[in-house]
Amino acid sequence: MSLWNYKFWKSSQFTFSSLVCKCLALVVAALVLRAVLFRSFLGFDVNGKPIGSDNLARVLDKNVDYGIRRDKFLEVPQIVWGLNNQKIAFARACLTARMLNRTLLMPSLSASLFYKEIDQLQPISFDKVFQFRKFNSICNGFVRLGQYSELLNQTEVLEMQKGSGRKWTLARDLDQLKEFSTNQYDQYEVIRIVGKHPFLWHDHWPIKDYAKIFEGLVLVDEFAKEAERVISKIRAVGREFSDNQVLAKKGEVDNEDSTKFSSIPYMAVHMRIEKDWMIHCKKLEQRSNINEICSSKEEIIQRVANIKAVNNPTVVYLAVADSLLEDNTILSGWKDGLLPFEKKKLGVSHIYDKYPYLIKSAIDYEVCLRADVFVGNSFSTFSSLIVLERTQKTISMGVPSSCNNNVGWPSYAYNVMGDLDGPKKWFTNMSDTSLQAVSYGSNRVSC
Ligand SMILES: *[C@@H]1O[C@H](CO)[C@@H](O)[C@H](O)[C@H]1NC(C)=O
Ligand SMILES: *[C@@H]1O[C@H](CO)[C@@H](O)[C@H](O)[C@H]1NC(C)=O
Ligand SMILES: *[C@@H]1O[C@H](CO)[C@@H](O)[C@H](O)[C@H]1NC(C)=O
């Protein structure tokens, strides 16, 4: 469940209905005014190119690529909500620190999903989940994470109060960042961000910048090994199946032959069909006038069956909400040659059960990220982040993201109809100037 989307939907719905109650002309007027203000705020650079997020950041911090100050810090509140929201909020904290040319003091993440009562949020230090040094080495020269032990003992702290609500616009947020990145605050060793809902910080950065940060998020060994165990189990059931096929064909197992067949691919399907998602997505469809957001179980199964690039047999790992593990019907109806498993049938529930929400989610994320083929919902932030990383991995292999081949890390969106009644091929548009499509969902999946 994407709380982020939910929250966004709630607030937008409120805005929307109250405006409609007044009159349509007011809406139009407001939209025109907003467009004018937004445009004039953005301005244009000397080449006549609009100064959008990334250009603006560059104008502000010409020298930022030459290094981040190691003796000036930014402190942010505990990072909260779902895994995806935490990743995005963490990236925003990093990019804010980068704008201020400061080192980000390593923040706490939240192990649990409680989001109403801050005291139930089980803080967990960033380096208990992701590798601290690896992050700094991957992001070297771009952003830097620091430890509290690096602070002097007479630290000068300046509080930076973030606003919230509708009046706290993108422009105001950016003005504040601009102000705090001037040298008048250099005497403060630490700038501490305070305020509610830092995860709603406005988005001033191009998608490439987010991708760099996400690349630096490598799970600590303990959890990476758990993900590895789940993946080995998936590979093992595939191997077992193909060995049995060889056995059936030849009447006996010849060791050399069976290894030939031993590696069968796996596909991960992030199947969002639980009740609260269905309610949320139906409302989103009504509000946005898009009918490609919700997919039923039947539609997902049918579209996945029509992916031509997938060989038979293939193990299908179903990444589903825990509430669906009791529903055996998700395992039936799959095309011959597709072998569906979720964590229960796979016999890996005990691995997940040891951990709090955040870690469970991070393990599932890793399993989906490394699948031969991934199929998700383009309105889910979890799916969208996976596709973003898979696109990035494909590009770094030197493969141009092409909608027509299956080299690299192919992904599909089952909620959008593609070729031959299959799901639509899906890439993240790495030239996008904001994270909008990833954090709020979109049915434009670049293919
Ligand atoms: C950022 O700090 C580095 C020193 O670590 C300095 O060389 C660079 O000029 C600074 N950039 C800005 C925009 O302040
Ligand atoms: C504070 O600084 C002094 C000298 O600079 C040092 O001796 C002392 O150990 C420091 N205290 C802490 C708590 O770091
Ligand atoms: C990707 O984003 C850029 C910038 O927003 C846009 O110009 C381009 O048309 C997009 N490409 C696709 C394939 O959607």
Image (tube, grey):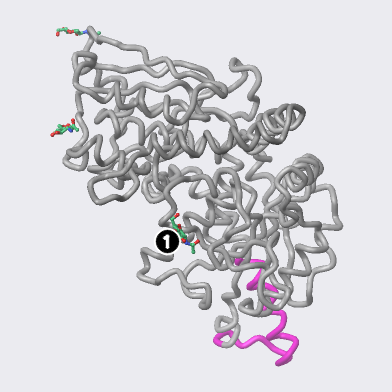
Q: Residue at x 59, y 31 (%)?
A: 81
> Foreground: 18 or 195?
18
> Which amino acid type is marked by label 1?
Lys
291 drawn magenta = no
239 drawn magenta = yes
- The chief SS type of the magenta part is helix
> Foreground: 285 or 77?
285
Q: Is residue 47 above or below residue 90?
A: below
Q: Residue at x 37, y 68 (%)?
A: 397
The quadrant in which residue 275 appears is top right
Q: Is residue 301 left or right of residue 200?
A: right
Q: Is residue 50 left or right of residue 314?
A: left
The quadrant in which residue 140 appears is top left
Bounds of the magenta segment: 235-256
Residue picked out by circle 1: 393
Q: Can you tell me which quadrant of the image ligand 2 is in?
A: top left
Q: Is residue 215 above or below residue 95?
A: below
**Place of residue 113 in the rendered image (x, y in percent of width and height, measured from the top left):** 63, 30
**Place of residue 246 in the rendered image (x, y in percent of width and height, measured from the top left):** 68, 86
Q: Is mark 1 within 8 Å of ligand 3?
A: no
Q: Quadrant of the C terminus?
A: bottom right
Q: Is residue 356 left or right of residue 78?
A: right
Q: Residue at x 37, y 46 (%)?
A: 209
Q: Secondary structure at mark 1?
A: helix
Q: Quadrant of the N terminus?
A: top right
**Place of residue 338 in the rendered image (x, y in percent of width and height, measured from the top left):** 73, 72
